[in-house]
Image: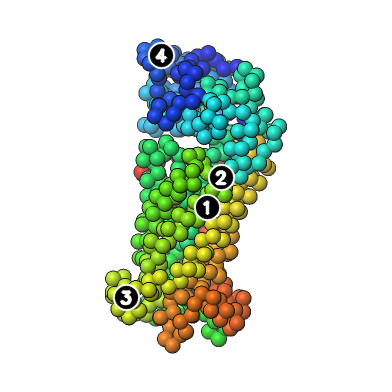
Amino acid sequence: MHKQGSFVSPLLSGVFCQCQNTGSCDDSCEPSYPCELCGGPEQDHRLKVLFQVLDVNGDGGICVNDLSIGLKKLGVHRTELELMKIVKAGDKDLDGQLDFEEFVHYLRDHEKKLRLVFKSLDKKNDGRIDKQEIMQSLRDLGVNISEQQAEKILKSMDKNGTMTIDWNEWRDYHLLHPANNIPEIILYWKHSTIFDVGESLMVPDEFTAEEKKTGMWWRHLVAGGAAGAVSRTCTAPLDRLKVLMQVHASRTNSMCIAGGFTHMIREGGMRSLWRGNGMNVIKIAPESAIKFMAYEQIKRLIGSNQETLGILERFVAGSLAGAIAQSSIYPMEVLKTRLALRKTGQFSGIADCAKHIFRKEGMAAFYKGYIPNLIGIIPYAGIDLAVYETLKNSWLQRYATDSADPGVFVLLACGTTSSTCGQLASYPLALVRTRMQAQATIEGGPQMTMSGLFKHIVKTEGAFGLYRGLAPNFMKVIPAVSISYVVYENLKMSLGVVSR
């Protein structure tokens, strides 16, 4: 972890409010803005003086080189990468430097973020952070550190030797520093919304109080939903092949990947490869919105006012939110399966398919396979979270020497691996769900219950029968995640989403 010496220039520590009550302000206060005692012209003057000190060449803008020289004069040392992050975060007009307005906005915005993190770490709400609170906060995130490591973190910020950190020490250490130590771990290692592999069973993302207040949360959801729509459309042929193999493949009717694609193209042409994709894309928006709202309400019901939930709380809240969302949109899941399995000319569209099912099979048909789908959420969410936390913890323990930023490739690898393990664990239930949804489409086929279908598959096809269609399912994981990430990142910039 990067260290800063105990000396902090009086000019830096005097930039913002020094009132003692800032350590325990409630939700109604705005600590990122000056109070009546410390604000006004005096603070404006201090900000101007600090800007002039850092504007080494006096051209009215602070570039990376200015920041490096100016901070060294004040006794603060930062790496070039850290300085570049600061300038990039505050540079609104993209001219490579910070003018006075951008500089002040960056400091106030950065202090607000630090205040939210400080509040989440201050478990006792006494305005101070001790080593036990640091250990507990990281333990909640799945990161186990020793008492000695916690003391090391404390000493890097503790100026007065009390082995606790008050708000002023916390802010002074992180002022003009892109988030480091605990804030980086919290911000970088959130379980991201972008890993869309066609199955929406994973635990929802966490959003900070600032993101909720500024409206960034809905921008993240929109970007994630659009990225999911693009990635699902690009990998739709593999998804339809998976459904066909789950329903029609057997010991007597062996269906390989090449044979499956050939059959689809012969039966309905190239366009038939995308059957069912329209409904698969349409259901993203309501499912994401319902899951997010349910997750936030469940967090309140289980009595958690913490910004970042512990692993067990995330599992419980995420599983329940997933169950509520799946229950709400499940008829769309049935329609997606029936549309993917339809023959050329069987239905004119989504509405015609829904009418046909309702007239012929009744309302109950829209909830066929509902129970295995609901049960499948538990192993998927549990293993997805457990594997992600294990990989995260392993990386932090081995490689997080100077920064907790793992880089995009590590995050994508961890997210993809954990999601794949979750799918593997819940796949037999997903297969049984799909077969139950499709039962009426197989002429003369038996109408079985979940347990009856399990027994039938194992008896007639062996345990391997529960994993039919697994190959095309896994083939689409890497392209789906890659496509969704690229689209997500580009949409974030278009929507003005600040990178976390």
Asked whether the viewer can see residue 140, the reply is yes
> Is mark 1 in CB contact (under 8 Å) with mark 2?
no
What's the residue at 45%, 68% (across, down)? 370
Q: Position of residue 164 (x, y in %)?
A: 61, 24
Report the amino acid beneath label 4: Leu
Asked whether the viewer can see residue 230, the reply is no
Q: Position of residue 424 (x, y in %)?
A: 58, 64
- Bin the neighbour count of mark 3 within 10 Å (Cα to Cα): few under 14, some 14-19, many 20 and up: some
- Bin the neighbour count of mark 4 within 10 Å (Cα to Cα): few under 14, some 14-19, many 20 and up: few
Q: Residue furthest bottom?
A: 444
Q: Which residue is mark 4?
A: 37
Report the amino acid beneath label 3: Phe
Q: Which residue is mark 1?
A: 316
Report the amino acid beneath label 1: Val
* Residue 125 to residue 411: above or below: above
The residue closer to the viewer here, 15 or 128, is 128
What's the residue at 48%, 17% (across, down)? 18
Gap in angstroms between the C-alphas marked 3 and 4: 69 Å
- Bin the neighbour count of mark 2 within 10 Å (Cα to Cα): few under 14, some 14-19, many 20 and up: some
What's the residue at 56%, 23% (across, down)? 166
Count every numbered label the image shows and give the total: 4
The residue closer to the viewer here, 391 or 138, is 138
Q: Which residue is mark 3?
A: 358
Report the amino acid beneath label 2: Gly
Q: Nearer the viewer, mark 3 or mark 1?
A: 1
Q: Quadrant of residue 428?
A: bottom right
